[in-house]
Image (cartoon, grey):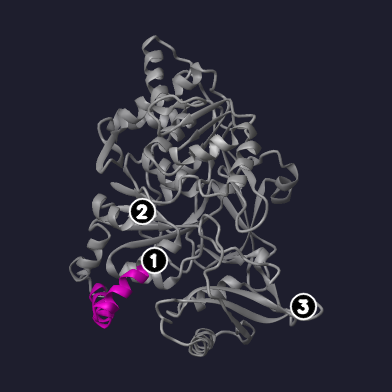
Amino acid sequence: MNKNYPLYNVVKFYDFKEMMDIAVRDDADKTALKYKSKGTVKEITYKELEEKTDKLGTALSELGFSDCKFAVLSENSHKWIITFITVLKGAGVIVPIDKDLPDTEALNLINMSDAAVLFFSGKKKDFVCENISKMKAIKLFVNMDDHEDGEFYRSFYRLVESGEKSLAKGKRKYLDSSNKRDDLKMLVYTSGTTGTAKGVMLSLRNLTSMVYYGLQTITVDGTGLSVLPYHHTYEAVCDILGSLHKHCTICINESLRAVSENLRLYKPDYILLVPVFVEFFYNAVWKKAEKSGKAETLKNTIKLSNALRKTGIDLRGRFFAKILESFGGNLKMIVTGGAPLREELGEFFDAIGIKLRNGYGITECSPLLSVNRNDYSDYRTVGVVVPCVDIKIYQPDEYGDGEIVAKGDTVMLGYYKNKKATETVLKDGWFHTGDIGHFNKDGRLVITGRKKNLIVLKNGKNVYPEEIEEYLLASDYIAEVVVYGIKDESGQETGLLAEIYPDPDRTKGMTEEEITERLKEEVRSKTADKASYKHISEIRIRDTEFEKTTSKKIKRNYNN
């Protein structure tokens, strides 16, 4: 854990057509996808996945849709993945749309993208019917769940059948299509926690570099459970494409409610998540231990196990067998991204025998920039920089913290039809992330906070609220928290306010006064050893959770 080691060997490939050809050449009969259908688990081999994408791509090409944009509005499914790989192998551009967006926003993104084809799930059929006249650029609608063609749409299944017939007749337009390295291949709309949606343009070079160099840095093997929404670049590129290039088996999680069940069913070796899921798992383990009266025993067992490991004796598989079984029994690694990870979580999962590896990235960089490696990790950092990327700290302050800027093969082409926004973040080839951080003595990247969240106190001190929030979230009584600056009449920030949503289980049965006093004490204790300017002056208690984006990030109120 304390020494870095050579990069992993990864097979190089030019494009995704070649990537899938390699998979079929080496592992044709290996299971690529597993998913549930009518209560049973279905499987698709690498050879079958290749055949299905060739058939779908051929059908689309024969209809005149090859080098256009293909929008996808659907839940996670094997058909989503088939569509995704089909477009990436061909001459087109994939446009993933968040299925949880309000109808008006989803419609706006579909129109902004200039997509000519819309793939949609059965659950989105009503939305499409109600808005079909407003989607003037869409020339072909494809229902991913209906087995028969409809009045205004083609059936996904019928298209695959049509493509099979065309291939039998020797139609090769799709098979013979090609891409240049800097061709646009993926258009991802992102707005973060604030702002208007911007279309991130990712090229073939961006995506293939992310897969190739990302797997050199951190690798996966065996079976993975695919949980995060597929419109997320982290899931689509790092998990789906990365797993396919390693010839792993991707098990599709059909809903958030099914995660625990599917962990036990598919028994994955690895899983990619955002920290909110890890927090959920962590809390579930401790709540179960407390409910059964075994929390103290678990704490003591962890201490004993850690002491034994220092002497070379590893009994985690035996000591924590029941906990590990709740994760399927085979889970070796969880990789997280998208938000800071509390050090406490990394220590806990390591203690019970599951590697928790956090990384850092942004959609505009395809998305990974740095990550802790399988066997070289420090939870306080976001790891080492991916080989194809250069990162520097722009205008560091007296403590070495400055804006993280990146240059390299994974940096986007720009924002779609938004030159002004592109010029704001891309300067001389360097992408300005808006995140603040520094490199530690080992050369690993440390994230301090977001530039736009920075609080500048009246006394000149800079406070990154994310840092304070991490301290406070270590309290069992605090479920969610956002730290703001307290402004005086002149608009200057004079102190810190913590807006808190208390943990409903911990505070059940307590009066408002008791909750307030408990939270004040928790805030005091968690920041007692911090610099005085990082102390909280005021707390505000919420009755409800904070509003969040569809990726579960809290929306900050900058007018607080």
- Can residue 324 be seen here? The reply is yes
Residue at 24% of width from left, 75% of height from top? Answer: 305
**Residue ID for mark 3:** 492
Report x, y in % for residue 328.
Answer: 25, 57
Residue at 24% of width from left, 63% of height from top? Answer: 324
Secondary element under disc 1, as helix, strand or loop, is: helix
User: Which mark's residue is nearer the viewer, 1 or 2?
Assistant: 1
Secondary element under disc 2, as helix, strand or loop, is: strand
The kind of residue on which mark 2 rests is: Ile
Report x, y in % for residue 149.
Answer: 44, 24
The kind of residue on which mark 3 rests is: Gln
Give yes or no for residue 301 being in the magenta stretch: yes
In this rendering, position of residue 23 left or right of residue 117: left
Q: Nearer the viewer, residue 378 or 132?
A: 132
The kind of residue on which mark 1 rests is: Phe
In this rendering, position of residue 262 left or right of residue 78: left
Report x, y in % for residue 549.
Answer: 55, 57
Crowding around mark 2 (Cα neighbors within 10 Å: few <14, some 14 to 19, many 20+) is: many
Q: Residue furthest left?
A: 318
**Residue ID for mark 1:** 280
Boundaries of the magenta span: 282-309
User: Which mark's residue is nearer the viewer, 3 or 1?
Assistant: 1
